[in-house]
Amino acid sequence: MAIPGPSSVWQSRIDFLKRRRGALVWSTFALLALAEAFVVGLPNLYRASATLLVERQGTEPLVESGAAEEAGSRLQAIKQVALSRSRQWSSPPAAEAADPAIICRA
């Protein structure tokens, strides 16, 4: 009895795969469909929120209309700085980038 050579072993494996091509395609499709359903069903893990605390620097009451307008303009300026694209897309300083406890900067 002759021992089969490497080419005949590979040829038998290729023939096996050709015979089972339909089963391979359907099982691959089913596996991908299950994986997609699993991934779509996962909850959103990365949600960010921020709270902006604005402290008054003075103790004067804001009863005057001019003071109220000044406070509004201050809040608008803070909002523009906080939401500016350059601040959102800038990389954190090296010390903060090395610290894994810091996840997001507001």
Image: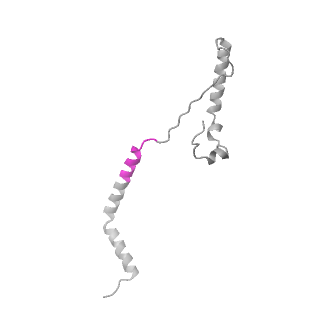
Find residue 20 and report its horizontal and vertical position in percent.
Answer: 31, 66
State the colouring used for the structure image.
one colour
Whether residue 55 is situated above or below residue 14 in the rendered picture:
above
The residue shown at (50%, 38%) is 47
Whether residue 8 is situated above or below residue 72 in the rendered picture:
below
Whether residue 28 is situated above or below residue 105 in the rendered picture:
below
Q: Nearer the viewer, residue 43 or 95?
A: 95
Q: Which of the 4 image quadrants contains residue 88? A: top right
Q: Nearer the viewer, residue 58 or 19?
A: 58
Q: Is residue 34 magenta?
A: yes
Position of 31 compared to 82: left or right?
A: left
**Magenta span: chief secondary structure:** helix
Position of 58 compared to 38: left or right?
A: right
Pick out the residue farthest to the top.
64
Q: How many marks?
A: 0
The residue shown at (38%, 51%) is 35
Residue range highlighted in magenta: 32-44
Q: Which of the 4 image quadrants contains residue 24? A: bottom left
Position of 57 compared to 51: left or right?
A: right
Find residue 73 and report its horizontal and vertical position in percent.
Answer: 66, 21
Q: Is residue 89 magenta?
A: no
Quarter the N terminus occupies:
bottom left
Find residue 51 and report its horizontal and vertical position in percent.
Answer: 56, 30
Whether residue 76 is situated above or below residue 1 in the rendered picture:
above
Quarter the C terminus occupies:
top right
Find residue 17 and report its horizontal and vertical position in percent.
Answer: 34, 68
Pick out the residue farthest to the bottom.
1
The residue shown at (37%, 80%) is 8
